[in-house]
Image: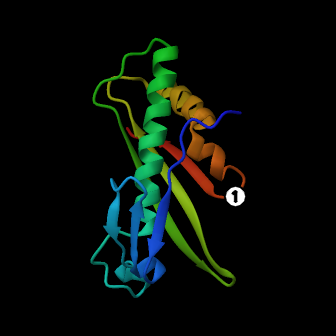
Amino acid sequence: MAVVYTAEVISTGDGRNGAVRSSDGLLDLPLSSPKAVGGSGTATNPEQLFAAGYAACFHSALRVSAREAKVALADDTVVAEVALHKEESGFRLSVVLTVELPGIDESEARRLAEAAHGRCPYSKAVRGNVEVRVDIAP
């Protein structure tokens, strides 16, 4: 398979309480641990960055699935909630994706969301390792 793009980001400082910067300079952010895990919560954190990437990627996959099915979408959204769980051996993540497709009946929305989940690179990357639930907003 041919590589079409590689994102490169460097982490500096103190990991979750440091900074991240992309090689092209478009991403340049301080990080801080969330207050819920004892951090200051004054900057973004890795879970928010992962949620942003997953929401955008899944939304693109959803749009492709809708185009292929010849379903017109309007005012559609995807919300990604990334939870950090404390376990005996450390931490793990789980994800809830909530898809809102106004004007689309629930069974069609579910079909499109399942198709998106099958093609989204983030979904493929975490499949079998991270619990992911896809919900359809009422």
Q: Where is residue 86 shown, x and y percent of the image?
A: 58, 79
Relative to 75, residue 26 above or below = below
Q: Is residue 136 visible?
A: no
Q: Residue at x 50, y 56 (%)?
A: 8
Please tell me whether residue 87 is drawn above or below residue 129 in the rendered image. below
User: Residue 20 lies in what quarter of the image?
Assistant: bottom left
Is residue 92 something one can see in this rendering?
yes
Q: Residue at x 44, y 55 (%)?
A: 51
Which residue is nearer to you in this view: 45 or 7?
7
Q: Position of residue 134 (x, y in %)?
A: 53, 44
Kindly indicate the quadrant of the structure image that contains residue 4: top right
| Quadrant location, the C terminus | top left
Identify the element where label 1 is drawn: loop
* Colour theme: rainbow
Q: Position of residue 112 (x, y in %)?
A: 52, 27
> Tag count in the figure?
1
Q: Is residue 34 above or below residue 110?
A: below
**Along the viewing direction, whichever of 30 and 54 lies nearer the viewer:** 30
The residue lying toward the viewer, choosing from 53 and 82, is 53
- Mark 1 — residue? 129
Of the residues shown, which amino acid type is indicated by label 1? Asn
Give the answer, above or below, for where 59 lies relative to 23. Answer: above
> How many residues crowd mark 1 within 10 Å: few (<14), some (14–19), many (20+)?
few
Could you tell whether 6 is left or right of 26 in the image?
right
In the rendered image, the residue lying farthest to the front is 24
Q: Nearer the viewer, residue 137 or 36?
A: 36
Residue at x 43%, y 15% (from the top left corner)? 71
Image point (49%, 43%), residue name = 135
Q: Quadrant of the N terminus?
A: top right
